Each structure stands twice: as C-alpha cells, then as structure tokens.
Amino acid sequence: MSKLFSPIKIGQLELKNRFMMAPMENGLADMGGEVNERIIDFFVERAKNEVSIIITGSVGISPEGRGLPTQLSIYDDKFIPGLKRMNDAIHKAGAKVGAQIYHAGRQASEAVTGIQPIAPSAIPCEIVGNNPREMTKDDILEIKEKFKKAAERSIEANFDLVEVHFAHGYLLHSFLSPHSNKRIDEYGGSLENRMRFPMEVLKEVLDVCRGNVPVIIRISADEYLEDGLKFEEVKTICKKAVEAGVEAISLTAGSYDAVEYTIQPMFIKQGFLIPFSEELKKEVNVPIIVAGRLNSAELINSIVEEDKADMIAIGRGLIADESLIVKMKENDYQDIRYCVACNQGCIDKVFLGQGVNCLVNARAGFDKERKIEKAAQAKNVVIIGAGPAGLEAARVSRLRGHNVTIIDKANKIGGKMETLSMPPEKATFLFFRDYLYNQFIRLGINFVQKDVESAKDIKDLTPDAVIIATGASQTVPPIKGIDSKNVVMAEDVLNGNVEVGSTVAIIGGGLVGTETSKFLANKGVKVHIVEMADTIAKDIGATFIGHLFKTLNEKGVEQHLNAKVNEITEQGIILEDREIKADNAVIAAGYKTNDSIVEDIKKTLKKFIL
C-alpha cells in the first residue's frame, strides 16, 4: 500500500495516515464564534472519510483579532463546551483534531470586531481597508498571555494538537515580515528582532502544551512580496521553532497582500510549494506538511513516496470531495471530484461572511441535510440538458435508484464547460466535466440526442419526472447596428467559431467580457472593454481580481467605463461622447434563461414536473 496510508507520529500523537485537513476558513460557526451543528456536521463528514487529523481553521484568541464574524473563537471559557462537543464528535468519527490559534492583526477589521485592529506597525491592509494601531509593550504582554490562555483552553476542549499561526499576514507573521514590521525597537529591524515576539508567543504555548499535546507551526514559505518574508529567513525561523520544541511544520504561502498565494486560484501552478517542503526537510528533523493546489491523486502520492514531504494538507480538495482520501485508498482516481480552484463557492463566500459551499459539490456545507438516499420507488426520470446541472441531476437521480435518461440537442455532454475552460488559466474547469462524464458512464445513464421543443418530444420516454436543465444563452442588447456582420458573440469567439480582426470592442465588462478580453489579448488582438458601470469585473472574487487587472494592463486592454453604446458600425462602435475604431464588436452583455419549453411541459405533464 502507498506510504500515504502508513501511520506517522507528530511528537507522541500517532496519526493513521498522512492526510491532514488543512485549516481553511469555512464560515459555518455561529456569529461570534460559537460551535453549532452545521460546523460539526461538516467536520464529521470528513472525519468519517479517512482524514487522519482535521485542523479546524483559525481560532480567535482575542476579540479584536477575529478576522470573520463566523470564525471559531477560544478567547473565553464560554467557548470550551462547544469546542469540546465538536472535538468529541470528530473523535467518534475517527479523526484527530487540532486548534489553529491565531490573531488576525492588521488583517482584522473594526467592521467585524467593533475594535481597532492592532499590528506591529500602523500599516493598513489594502484588501481589508482598515486602520490598525501600532502595538505597545503592554499590548505585546497581553497578547502573549492570550495565546497562553488559548493553549490551555485547547487542551481543556480535547484538542489533540495546537497549531500556532505564523502565516498569511496575520499578527505573528506580520511581525516576522519586513513588509509589515517597520518597528525600530527590539521587535523590529533584524530577523532576530522580528522573530522575538512570535517566538515568545510560541514558547508560552509550548510551556502549556508540553506533556499534553504537540505544538506545530504553520508558516508561509514565501510571502511573494518584493519586501516580504523570503524562504531563506523562513528556514531560520523553522530551525529556531524546532529547537524550541515544535513537533512539525506546515508550509503554506502568501499574505492578504499576496492573497492569490494563500488560497491559490487556477493561475497558480499545482504543487508550487513542493520544492520548499523538499528543501526544508533537509534542514529540520520534524515532519514537514505541504499544501497548495494538490488536486491530482498522482501528484499527492508522489510527494510522500518521493520523500518531498511527510504529510499532505488538503483544504479545498476535501470541500470539493469529502471522500477524496477513501477514493485514493481504493485507487479509484477517476471517481475523485477534484477542486477546480475557482474559489467561487468557498473562500469568496466566506470573505462575504457566508458559509462555505462549492461549485462542484452541492453537499459542501450542507452535509447532513443533503444526503443521497435511495428512493422508495424507482421512476423514469428524464432530464433535458446535458450541461453540468443536468449531469449532476442525472448522477444524483441514478444514485437514488431511478432510471435516468438525459437529452441534449448536441451530440456531447458538458454544456458550456469547454467554453468556460477556453480563456487563459481556466483549463482546470475541465476537471469537473471529466468527473461528470466518468459518473455518466459508470452509472449507466441513458443519452438521447434530440432538440426538445415541446412536451410531445419526450412522451415516448414515458417520464415519471422531468428535470429541465437547459441553461442560458447570451443576451443580445437592443443597440442600433447589432445585426451588422462584424458583430460576434463572446461564446463564439471562445469556442473558435468565428475569427476577429486585429482590434475589437467588447461590450460588457463582467466575467465573460473580461475573460474574453484575456483570451483575445493573449492572441495579440487589441482589445477595448466597454462597460456601462463605473468598474469592470464587479463580481470577481478577491483571489482573482488583482491578477485579472494586472493581466489586462500588461496586455494593453483599454477600459471605457460609464460608457453607453449608441450604435455599432462597420468601422467600430459609437459611444455617447466618442467613437472606438474596431474590426469587430464582441457581445458579452449577460445571459437569459433558456426556458421556452417550461410552460408547455408543465401544462402537458402536470404531475411529472420537478
């Protein structure tokens, strides 16, 4: 059997395999940080599926240091009973559990806590948009005591391990980083001084935990900022931490100022942290844990087999597929529903103060109420549309025991998934298409190619239930000249159905418009984005937005904001106040639902519609 499934010890704590659930925020706790049934259900579902240890995500050690309103807290004894109840449930389900104790520092917000944030230096975090104050010596003493108390409460709440957060731009990391620490006292300047406060905190925690539970740190191998913390200094910090008594090191990357390296989107290379873990293993003699876009079973297996790390920490991958480890253990790699690194359902939602969900896993965050159970009676289920919604409905219906037929006018499945994957750096969307295709084959779902225009087109299939999953089509805005030969739709451009000239004007600056801009600019086309609002990319999440604007700027894409198109001509487009010369106008102005058959099916098959 793979080395991945052999036991490993962190200090005296024995773990059954090499899989850790990484400490990723999930937004499922109650407002204020109390444990509830929803967060317990979420962790228990992963514990039942062979995770050896779950790190619960950041647990706030102080009220002003909480980064999110729905983040677990441990700054008061009142939190202990709930945490103990959660941990007991995780233990019963078969996993160990660790507390990642932290203070958000300059990445906290008064809007969340009602208290001004504290930091090594009074440098605002651009993403949060806050106004931290510089910590005094009294603050430093107080925070050390709060970390100590958090460690004591962690033991009382039956945590098996304590992880001290040295990463991601939070308080301890912000002291380590020259980017955020501009102090001129004994806590700033040289690495020795910048390490002083984090190491004092660590020693307080170690003193509490020694003989009770092991202590580990999570640290950013590289902050990915020009003036940030770099790996050479990180290696020194790790050596000092091990000398102090740390029993393992968990590697991550980035900070909020380089957030794309903290929760890596599609454009960050898979396994980008592996070279760091491989090198760090040569420097220290404790287990090294690595994370970072590990959404390939073959890659995960090779890391431990080739001794590049001792353990694997997976966050989003276990949100996307709670059974990932079981499927790896059974060598059923084709059944894994990989994370596509879109960040739309997980961290984008959590940053908005909502609970985690997942673009590819509708059960994530709803683990108890969305169980797939056998139906009392098998029915003939007809699904119209073989895109991702239709295929997922077919998968669930088949698992419930129904006979399923899926219909699509195209002789293929996947809907717009290929279109979605066409822009630069979006290819991993095909992971989900491939998963759905594999399920379609292995579950024996019937497929019929047919253009369904009315209820009579499906009567021969004698449906007991009909699911309409016909998706949406691009809207065509009512602009003078919209029927001109030089007007093309964004989807046709992405699918390679049309050719465009050397200059284009894209009408619409949302997700489709900006991704089409990248696609064309990458081919050397001069691109103008025309948007009626005051900004483009309004609905794009924090981990993508910076990279998007950087790419558009590098490719010379011009933005025309608060701009209304009056007319499209053969020479380009005419705005209210100017004209843009362009060979083609590309429409990316939103979508409308394909619902023309709904009423007829409702009317004709009244008792069968779902």
Image: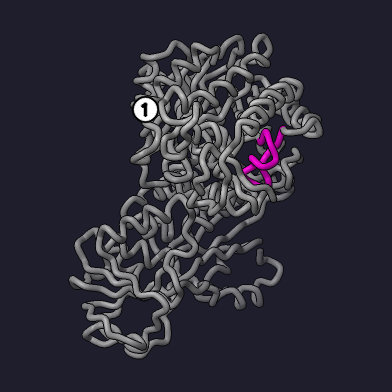
**Residue at x 69%, y 72% (from the top left corner):** 606
Q: Is residue 162 left or right of residue 324?
A: right
Tell me, yes or no, whether the highlighted magenta stretch contains residue 72.
yes
Q: Position of residue 204 (x, y in %)?
A: 63, 19
Tally of marks: 1
Q: Residue furthest front?
A: 185
Residue sticking out furthest to the bottom = 480
Point out residue 251 in the picture as x, y percentages from the top left corner. Answer: 45, 27
Q: Quadrant of residue 548?
A: bottom left
Q: Is residue 341 magenta?
A: no
At a point 65% along the width and 34% down the height, the residue shown is 59
Magenta span: 60-74
| Of residues 4 and 435, the one drawn nearer to the viewer in this rendering | 4
Local secondary structure at mark 1? helix
**Location of residue 67 (image quadrant):** top right
From where the camera sits, is residue 400 visible?
no
Assess disc 1: are there few (<14), some (14-19) or many (≥20) residues with their C-alpha within 10 Å of its C-alpha.
some
Question: Is there any visible trace of residue 142 in the rendered image?
Answer: yes
Q: Amino acid at mark 1?
A: Phe
- The quadrant of the image that shows the C terminus is bottom right
Q: Is 377 situated above or below 206?
A: below
Q: Depth check: 523 or 530 in front?
A: 530
In the displayed structure, 439 sits above or below 560; it is: above
Residue 161 at x, y percent in the picture: 63, 20
Quarter of the view holding residue 340: top left
Taking the spot 55% from the left edge, 12% from the top edge, the residue there is: 245
Residue named by callout 1: 231
Colour scheme: one colour
- The residue that appears at 72% across and 21% down in the rendered structure is 152
